[in-house]
Amino acid sequence: MRRKPLRPLAHIISARQNGKNPDFIEAKERSKRNQALQLKTRVRAENRLLVLGLIFIIGFSAIGGKMAMLASSSVQEVRQYNTGSKIINQRANIVDRNGNILATNMSTQALYAQPPLMIDPKKAADDIYKIFPDLDYERLVKNFGSDKRKFVWVKKSVSPEQQQLVHDLGEPGLLFGNREMRLYPNGKLAAHILGGTRFGEEGVRAAEIVGVGGVEKYFDKMLRDPALEGEPLKLSIDLTVQAATRQVLKDGMRLMNAKGASAILMDVNTGEIISLVSLPDFDPNNRPRAAILGDPSENPLFNRAAQGLYELGSTFKIFTAATSLEKGLVNPQTIIDTTPFRWNRKTYKDYKNYGPTNSVEDIIMKSSNVGTIRMALAAGTSAQKKTLKDLGFFEAVPVELGEASRTKPQIPKNWSDTSTITISFGHGISATPLHLATAYSIVANGGFRVKPTIKKIDFGNLSREQVISPKTSQQLISMLRRVVSEKDGTAKMAKVEGYEVAGKTGTAEKIKPTGGYYDDKVIATFASIFPASDPKYTLVVSLDEPEIEVYGKNRRTAGYTSVPVAAEIISRVAPILNLRPIVPNNKMTYTSISSQ
Amino acid sequence: MRIFIYIVCSFIVITMAYWAYTENYTTQASIRRVEELNRLVADEKEAISILNAEWAYLNRPERLSNLADLNFIKLKLVPLAAQHFTELEVIPMSPRRSLVVSSPVLVSSDGGKQFP
């Protein structure tokens, strides 16, 4: 820009000629120049202010935004802190109906190795083998000495003492990871109910626990659900009753030389399983592997009560009586022909001759096959099928045990008249003891359908679906009572002081794998209900291949084997179950606890 | 006047800054304390669960029945049986002493309604 002079010569000359003061021109020019300069400065200052304002706005909004974010996220932060404590109980406890712990978690350590960090792999392998002699020595040496392996699991759970021993080795390549393990403080007590667990996905810091059997498997999702906040799973089992039942059954099994046994105690009204024992059993803390070879039913993992399909023999006769009573064909006093019965070139006879005729209640009491057959044929196949279907013998038991829900009873595909005959006394149909307990509960509770459950029922949410009429139920209970109370009854050994027991025995020859029946191997079952005057519980005791010498003879029938065992269980368990005993007053002394 | 306002403003700013500073530090200290407490709670919970497991282990029916057998001479504990129950009437009650009122207490002095 060309700068304009303050005293332009042309203006000055003309001013002088006109006689004006040329200084005015200079002053005017100067003021013009100053104005321009002021304007320029002002614009610049305004721009600066604007920029500065912008910077402040950005700065303050950044700080304000951050503050707002902090204010709004405070809740989230608190929640984050709380999660720390939740890791402890990643799997809910399992408790019995009174809150006693059946399964819980323990924190433990898992031992792993990082071979690249090891100073002396050979020595480490030697020392580790000394601490854990159950490990495979060759494998330890191979794994620790390998150049390729960066990480090796050594032991899944280590006790604090063992951990200290490993620390004492001072080997930097041996490291520990936090771990939770499942603990069953009662050991074998409720093995088949609880099932067991194994480690699932494994990390260094934590490992997943997965249920592999029993309720641990059935309720796996629920037990692991964090939304339930570790709310324990309450089972219908009573720890004390379970312990007494298992103890008596175990002793009974040994005494009767049986190779297996099972017992189920069920509440007849709610279907709650108070106790379920299957022997031989296992320790769920150290669950054995499932056998690949051999008969799975010989394995301790096999739940005889819920998985074992057996022909349950004469215990079924009461269902035949139920069918005939329901159809109105007979009443307990009706006389039935009990002479040997011939059908399809086969003669059916009784265990011994009970005379030419017997009443229905005597047929049940003495357990007459031919009497039952005649009742079944009179009632007909469809009526028999309907009764057994209503009592639940056509479906797997809907209990919360995976083993049970996979076990469907074996019923004849082609239900001929011969099937009707054999099924009337419990042959030609295979069901689990749990099926039998459910059916006897229906008989005992006045004829209402029962849904067996292993979970404690807190509210009276009972099905009131009538399957058998109350009158029939009452008649059946009286007949079952006579089996125990009468002199000729097959279960007279089931008399328990203080409690009226009713029940039916069943002795079924075992089926050979090659076909036909063994004549010296039986399943002896006793299905009982007590107290008979107002039934509260069903107890089914089943012994596999029992044999005992009584009165100089080898006895296998249920009356000599499973009945005394069941009686002992009832006498032990009924007082614990708060059942009021019937004992004559003069026999009682209130100091008897200490005087015995 | 203007100088006075400047002084007051800067004093306020300094005070507020000091307040904000202390608040910040107490907040951080509280957060650390909460973390510490949460850790302690977690430790306690773990201890409780271990103690519960131990309690259940020590009270397992098998052990208790073995202990009862071992100490039978001293305790004479036997499994509960029907004979151990009795009717209430069979148990002799302690003789009931008749209540003798020797020094009556005046309950109402107001001449109001008397309640028996």
Image (tube, coloured by chain):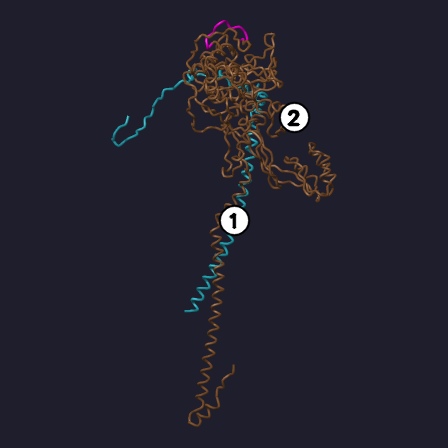
Question: How many numbered badges does the structure rendering display?
Answer: 2
> Residue A505 versus residue A92: which sits nearer the camera?
A505
Q: Amino acid at mark 1?
A: Ile
Q: Position of residue A207 (x, y in %)?
A: 60, 38
| Pointer 1 local density, CA inside 10 Å: few below 14, some 14–19, many at least 20 | some
Q: Chain of mark 2?
A: A
Query: Which residue does the numbered mark 1 point to in the structure image?
Result: B31
Q: Which chain is brown?
A: A
What is the number of the mark on residue B13? none
**Image position of A410 with respect to A107: above or below:** above
Q: Which residue is painted at 51% across and 33% down in the image? A: A232
Q: Residue at x 47, y 66 (%)?
A: A53
Quarter of the figure with residue A262: top right
Magenta part of the protein: which range?
A349-361
Label 2, on which residue? A293
Q: Is residue A353 part of the magenta span, yes or no? A: yes
Asked whether B67 or A220 is in front, the reply is A220
Q: Colour of chain B?
A: cyan
**Residue A161 in the image: x percent, y percent?**
65, 35
Viewer-nearest of discs 2 and 1: 2
Q: In the rendered structure, does residue A323 fall within the stretch colored magenta?
A: no
**Chain to which the residue tagged by mark 1 belongs:** B
**Relative to residue B19, is residue A314 depicted above or below?**
above
Q: Main secondary structure of the magenta part?
A: loop
Looking at numbered disc 2 in the image, what kind of residue is underneath it? Leu
Residue shown at 47%/51% (left/top)?
A: A72
Residue A295, how many percent across, how many down? Answer: 63, 23
